[in-house]
């Protein structure tokens, strides 16, 4: 069994990292939800601990509409999706906060959940194309300059959305392909679109018999290279699966993520991958598992490395961070824990200050700092080490925060409900 970064990931990392003088900081492209490797880890550097809506703010801009998607960054451009005047929209900002362009697409389907929107999925880019996906079913390909190249509506083409809540799965890229996972009540599928034209390259069913609502998922897939082949790893419908990116063929499937066949065990948090192991949160925040990513066919009985269950053990909504074999997990009620991905051993845990408010955003690990946004706009910053978690600051952004923080030149981009903030250390604006 071998594991390697995809060629596109290797190229991305090579061009994305650079050193800024005289300060020791780092910048990187952040081309998709959870960053270049979908692990929620920033480049090494010094990042700010203390900030707010008016402290250490380089700029803030009012967004033209509601959205919960995490912004992405490529070179000197920031891309954000949101509803604009009843339509799905993509907006591009410069690193100085100036708006460069906006593109309106099809009619918007507004969010249903109090922390949802019609623009939950994050866009994705390879530096040439930007692809956005919306609750309406619209998937659109644009140039980085804002010109629309193609548009396809998956719901019009393949059937209506049957999720109980708002679509949350973000698209991913693999070479010349856009990959989207549609995991819902019946008619679940994976689809590959041509990045340049939007043409359907393949579509395969991904359906399992599940209890009520347990066949629905809001998690995002990711692409990893396994044994020299690009594989789409997807969590949902009580299964973790691996599909060939080139053909859509199912390579392996691992079940057993709902042994009691319980209803309403829908998946929100995504699995994270380090090496040849996936760390899988499931069971509405009560279960965790480690799964080896190899084999053929049904690997349920052979590939599970470990499994744990317990109240408050895992995470229902926030997707964990993984770095150097360690997984940093933020629970919905504010429990922070570190696990060894290979053994499943819990190395340490800590609790953030108690509140009725919950954590919907996924954490970011930047240097030795873990950023944990709460739904009310409080962002907790803690230092992580072998010894555990040390709370450094509680930062009030003054508005709800559902999107994940994004690293930017030693600082942060924070998307609130109404504003986009650029945080820089040492600013007192």
Image (spheres, rainbow, N blue to C red):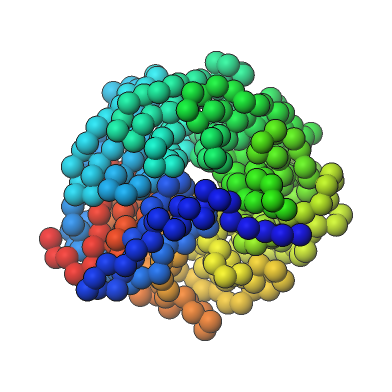
Quick one: which residue is furthest to the left in this view? 429
Residue 307 as seen in the image, left or right of residue 197: right
Kindly indicate the quadrant of the structure image that contains residue 417.
top left
**x 44%, y 26%: residue:** 140
**x 34%, y 60%: residue:** 27
Does residue 219 sit above or below 41 in this rendering?
above
Does residue 56 sit above or below 85 in this rendering?
below
Could you tell me residue 55's position as x and y percent? 19, 63
Could you tell me residue 86's position as x and y percent? 33, 22
**x 67%, y 59%: residue:** 3
**x 62%, y 39%: residue:** 217
Quick one: which residue is furthest to the bottom in this view? 387
Does residue 182 sit above or below 354 in this rendering?
above
76 and 292: which is toward the camera:
76
353 and 384: which is toward the camera:
384
Task: Tell me the quarter of the image containing the N terminus.
Answer: bottom right
Kindly indicate the quadrant of the structure image that contains residue 160.
top right
Kindly indicate the quadrant of the structure image that contains residue 127.
top left
246 and 352: which is toward the camera:
246
Could you tell me residue 25's position as x and y percent? 31, 69
Tell me if residue 316 can be seen: no
- In the rendered picture of this protein, how many numbered marks are placed on residues? 0
Quick one: which residue is furthest to the right in this view? 301
Tell me if residue 98 can be seen: yes
Task: Tell me the quarter of the image containing the C terminus.
Answer: bottom left
Could you tell me residue 264's position as x and y percent? 67, 41
């Amino acid at each position: 069994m071998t594991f390697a970064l995809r060629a596109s990931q290797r190229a991305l990392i090579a061009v994305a990292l650079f050193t800024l003088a005289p300060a020791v900081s780092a910048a990187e492209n952040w081309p998709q939800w959870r960053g270049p490797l979908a692990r929620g880890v920033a480049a090494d550097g010094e990042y700010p601990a203390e900030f707010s809506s008016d402290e250490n703010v380089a700029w803030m801009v009012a967004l033209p509409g509601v959205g919960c998607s995490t912004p992405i960054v490529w070179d000197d451009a920031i891309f954000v999706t949101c509803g604009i005047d009843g339509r799905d929209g993509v907006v591009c900002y410069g690193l100085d906060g100036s708006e460069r362009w906006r593109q309106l697409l099809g009619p918007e389907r507004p969010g249903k959940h109090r922390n949802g929107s019609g623009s939950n999925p994050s866009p994705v880019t390879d530096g040439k194309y930007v692809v956005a996906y919306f609750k309406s079913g619209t998937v659109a390909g644009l140039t980085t300059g804002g010109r629309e190249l193609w548009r396809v509506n998956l719901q019009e083409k393949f059937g209506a959305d049957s999720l109980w809540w708002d679509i949350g799965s973000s698209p991913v890229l693999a070479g010349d392909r856009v990959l989207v996972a549609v995991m819902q009540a019946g008619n679940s599928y994976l689809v590959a679109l041509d990045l340049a034209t939007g043409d359907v390259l393949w579509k395969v069913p991904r359906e399992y018999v599940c209890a009520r609502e347990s066949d629905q998922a809001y998690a995002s897939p990711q692409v990893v290279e396994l044994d020299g082949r690009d594989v789409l790893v997807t969590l949902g419908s009580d299964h973790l699966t691996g599909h060939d990116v080139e053909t859509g063929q199912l390579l392996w499937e691992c079940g057993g993520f709902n042994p009691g066949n319980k209803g309403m065990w829908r998946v929100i948090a995504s699995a994270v991958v380090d090496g040849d192991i996936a760390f899988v949160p499931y069971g509405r925040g009560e279960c965790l598992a480690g799964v080896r990513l190899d084999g053929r066919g049904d690997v349920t009985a052979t590939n599970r490395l470990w499994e744990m269950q317990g109240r408050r053990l895992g995470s229902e909504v926030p997707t964990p961070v993984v770095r150097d074999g360690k997984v940093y997990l933020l629970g919905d009620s504010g429990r922070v824990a570190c696990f060894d991905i290979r053994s499943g051993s819990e190395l340490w845990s800590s609790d953030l200050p108690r509140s009725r408010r919950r954590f919907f955003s996924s954490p970011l690990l930047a240097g030795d700092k873990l950023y944990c946004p709460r739904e009310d706009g409080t962002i907790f910053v803690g230092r992580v080490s072998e010894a555990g978690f040390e709370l450094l600051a509680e930062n009030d952004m003054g508005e709800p925060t559902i999107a994940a923080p994004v690293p930017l030149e030693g600082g942060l981009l924070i998307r609130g409900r109404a504003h986009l903030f650029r945080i820089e250390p040492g600013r007192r604006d």
